[in-house]
Image: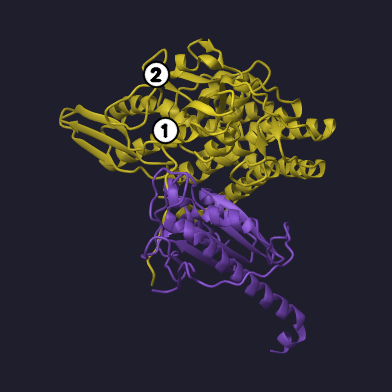
Amino acid sequence: MSAVNVNVDVHHLTRVEGHGNIVIDVKNGDLIKCEWQIVEAPRFFEAFLRGRPYTEASHITSRICGICSVGHATASLRATENALQVEVSEQTELLRKLLFHGEMIDSHVLHVYMLVAPDFFGAGSVLPLAASHPEVVMRALRIKKLSGDLCAMIAGRHTHPIAMTVGGFNHLPTVKELLAMRERLVAAREDMDETIALLKTLPWPQFERETEYVSLQKDDEYAFIDGRIATTDGFTYELSEYRKVTNEYLVPHSTAKWSKHNRDTYMVGALARFNNNYAQLHPRAKAAAEELGMAPIVTNSFLNSAAQAIEMVHCVEDGIRIIDELVDRGIEEEPLYQFQGKGGEGVGSCDVPRGILFHNYVIDDNGLIQSANCVIPTNQNHANIEADMRALLPQVLDQPQDKIRHTMEMLVRAYDPCISCSTHLLDVEFV
Amino acid sequence: MVGDVGTRHASRVHQNRPSNDSPGPSGGTRVIGLGNLMRGDDGVGVRVTQMLMSRDLPDGVQVVDGSTRGLGLVSLMEGWQRVILVDAADVGQAPGCFVRFTPQEAQLLGQDQHLSAHEAGLRDALLLANALNLLPEEIVIYGVQPASLDWEDRLSPQVEATVPVLVGSILDELQANAADHSASSAHPSTLAKE
């Protein structure tokens, strides 16, 4: 071991959402450096919001992330509604949950199939996978189309949820649309079964590291919107106490903020929700977990991707249930909220695909946002990612450098990190 | 250089035609604007679609905001005969200029197998759709040269000024396509003979 030298320097890790570097330096078996470096450009959303009317907040923040636009919009609306003491109807709650399920499936299927699966198939990306296993990629696209259409049906648009507004929706799906979507969700069970069957065959890396798992929690459902903050170390907090959990701080090698709670690090995301809220999963999702050999508390971070697949099963099933409830109740036009001339402070929280998200606004009596704070899930995971890297490194140090690099990349990708919504500039070279 | 370089002085003809909000995907044209409105000129594609949505469009045309859909763009394109994509692009022109081109003209469907979701934009989605034989019959791309991609919720003055010109060009193209389509469907027997 003492002669081992490893130098891994992955700049701009591929197949993650944003820019992050993995830097590992081992000399004569001694660990000199093992860092997860974030090179995120500073974000200005909090500054964007200052001075804006509260009605714009959800539309602005839904642009933070093209993948989690519903999640940001929902957290934003809940923060605003809590600040202005707006009650939302049962119909609005149901529609928001259904929409949220759509986005959860949309994000998870992208991650599991397009970003994680290529590692297991020995493919550098989903492109060679599309050539070698077209049926796998076509299934992913089929699921993605279903979830995208579900989002568009409720939110009014494929990517940005324009129909969502403070207190409710300014556009409602028809019963006919809901029933057509129900049929498609029922048909998607086959693709869900195939997804679990596929994941069962994958050689998941063996790795265990205990940490604290943090998520939303409710007694009567698998929590994605509202509830309380719960951790596997036994802590619970009201949403308004979120700063007691996030405790953001800065490290020299990252432009993003990091977080810690009871331990030096904690983890958020699908695995955290699975570990905290297994009891509230739909029976079919529990069966999927059993199929994959997973029962809480799972401490292998690589299995975050498997937990995402289990959540996809849950969202399909709960989506069917919600549609049944909506159809039974009938869809009704509801009056939209009118500002009452009194501001306040509110916290909104959702457990979005990558983990627990907080929005916190102060709104003045003119309906203008005076201050805003937004804590995103990936920032809460940074410290845990680096701690996992440090724990995993000794286990793989005897392997070739390329293999070490690849394993570390897989570990980071398992978190589905979203480091920043980078631009997507097309670089054109004409022939 | 291939493609037509547009300028702010490009002429356009705007004809009023009845709109159709919900055409079936087969045989129709979908216009998809891409980008992030919070990243300065990166949002130009979305701004163009927003303006197009307020205009009268020919039958069979649908405009959608593709934003930062990444690989989800494959699903947005699937099943449409013709797709017009609008995106910020480094097309080697002055900021605000735009170029109309096809994927073939820009070598976007080459052999490069390196695909990363953090940059999953237009090129990656086209590559994936191509690999799965899901590409629409006809793809046209309007690439707009950005001036700034900083965190800003507005376009640069150069690109802002281009938006109505670009919208005019796209409307012209949609009208021309609609005219071609109605001409061909009006004389099926002639076409059959040829």
Chain coloured yellow in this rendering: A
- Residue A233: x and y, percent? 48, 12
Marks 2 and 1, the one that precedes in the sequence: 1
Say which mark, if any, is on residue B173: none
Judge left or right: residue B188 versus residue A121: right
Residue picked out by circle 1: A205
Q: What amino acid is found at the position of numbered circle 2 in the picture?
A: Lys
Q: State the quadrant of the C terminus of chain A.
A: bottom left
Q: Badges 2 and 1: C-beta atoms under 8 Å apart? A: no
- Residue A204: x and y, percent? 45, 34
Judge left or right: residue A250 versus residue A104: left
Quadrant of residue B25 within the rendered picture: bottom right
Quadrant of residue B93 within the rendered picture: bottom left
Residue picked out by circle 2: A260
Residue in the image at 55% along x and 17% along y:
A239
Q: Secondary structure at mark 1?
A: loop
Q: Colour of chain B?
A: purple
Quadrant of residue B96 within the rendered picture: bottom left
Check the residue under mark 1 and report the chain it is in. A
In front here: A176 or A126? A176
Q: Secondary structure at mark 2?
A: loop
Disc 2 to disc 1, C-alpha distance: 26 Å
Q: What amino acid is found at the position of numbered circle 1 in the picture?
A: Pro
